[in-house]
Amino acid sequence: MQAAEAGLSLVDRIAQLKAQGIHSVLAQFTDLHGVPKGKLVPVVRLAEWVESGAGFAGPSIWGTGLPRMGARSEYMGRVVPESLQPLPFMPGVAHAVCDGFAGGQALDTCSRQVLKAQLSQLAARGWTLWVGVEPEFFLFSASGGQAGQPAGDPLDQLSKPSYDLKSIHRQQALLEDLRSCLTQLGFDILQIDHEDANDQYELNYRFTDALTAADRYQLFKLSAHAIAQRHGQVFSAMPKPRADSPGSGLHFHLSITDAAGRAVMAQPSGVGGLSSVGNQFVAGLLGHADALAALCAPTVNSYKRLAVSDSRSGTTWSPVWKAMGTNNRTCLVRTVDGRIEWRLPDPSCNIYLAIAATLAAGLDGIDRGLPPVVAHEEDLYSAFAAGLPTPDMLPRDLHDALVALQDDELLRQATGRSVCEQFLAMKWPEWRAYAQHVSTWEHEQYFSLY
């Protein structure tokens, strides 16, 4: 992202922002659900926000685990000065990412701090993690009907709508506003296309280091929500808003370089184009996949996407099998050009926590020297339909994923015990509420039958 100029003092940076007409800073952090939160603070007191942080009531934020009183009851969001940049859709306001602190210490339940801690362990090896994310999302009308259900483009009705240019044309004003906004925020846009469901789009931008990738995705969502609203629409990162259509993923493209810039996990002659280290990383992902599902696909709705189901388009890309394949989109791990595409995450995840846990699992595979993973070159959906043997599947619902995380002591320890405990404490009530909910489908099936 467009950072404060190198070597510029904070006093000079404040003067520069004021000269640009900036009067306030949107100090933004991320709660454990992965939702951007924050407040507006005056730019003239930026030094205070950087050194001490903007204060928030800790128990009012999902997943902090902070008490209602005492020195550690305040969540202090310390502004990361290099993240400051004007927000195109909020004139006079600059956006800033915050790190969570409490009682003067880095907060171990702040997901950004969790990712930073994981990356520091990687840096100790002389390695850098690079992440490219692929945001998929829906655009719905903001008026009429149940929230999120009315079509954003009523004419978007093709049964196989991938790459539909007519819909792109009809949504051009919104998409152009989004492209322009993100470009001003320093995103290197690679492509925008219509995805495989009606009203579904994908916007890709260039990969970056892992922490910047997480920060940038949160800024993307913040921007997309605001711009969609400006156009009378709703941006939705719900994984599976329609039962008969494909859902939205948030695939991670992962690669690691050493201190000399050499690719650690790539080897053209290796299985799947991976080196032995890369293959061990994949083995770690697949070995911890059940527990990772809870953190990468963290909602009840996530498992409506992660299912072998029919699609109106006739195609589904749901990665339900714990397998690796060379350019094989039916596998959980797809290898392409010497990098790993981790297809489990969806856009409802906390991206900081999802990347941190993914990295922890992959490094565990390396550290334990797990045996090579066999690459599956067959279409696993076709094999499944034909009754042929297939790899094990991911958990079928959030309950089983939470149990897997609860039982995976190694992953919880490696990712961060405190944050995983808070995550589980937050998610179990969500599952119980869903399990006790009586749906319209149940009424339709059973109300008059018995």
Image (cartoon, grey):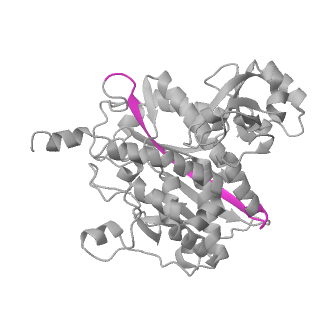
Horizontal side, residue 367 vs residue 350: left or right: right
Query: Residue sitting at 25 percent across and 74 percent down?
Result: 387
User: Considering only vertical position in the picture, is 112 above or below 386?
Assistant: above
User: Considering only vertical position in the picture, is 279 above or below 341?
Assistant: below
Q: Quarter of the image holding residue 199?
A: top left
Is 140 part of what is drawn in magenta? Answer: yes
Secondary structure predominantly adopted by residues drawn in magenta: strand
The quarter of the picture where the C terminus appears is top left
Q: Quarter of the image holding residue 149?
A: top left
Query: Residue sitting at 85 percent across and 29 percent down?
Result: 47
| Boundaries of the magenta span | 122-144
- Residue 388 vs residue 272, the one in the foreground: 388
* Residue 192 horizontal/vertical position (percent): 49, 42
- Residue 34 vs residue 5, the one in the foreground: 34
* Residue 345 horizontal/vertical position (percent): 50, 54
Query: Residue sitting at 38 percent across and 31 percent down?
Result: 140
Question: Which residue is outermost to the bottom?
Answer: 371
- Residue 184 vs residue 114, the one in the foreground: 114
The quarter of the picture where the N terminus appears is top right
Can residue 209 be seen? no
* Residue 60 horizontal/vertical position (percent): 60, 32
Is 243 part of what is drawn in magenta? Answer: no
Horizontal side, residue 388 vs residue 1: left or right: left
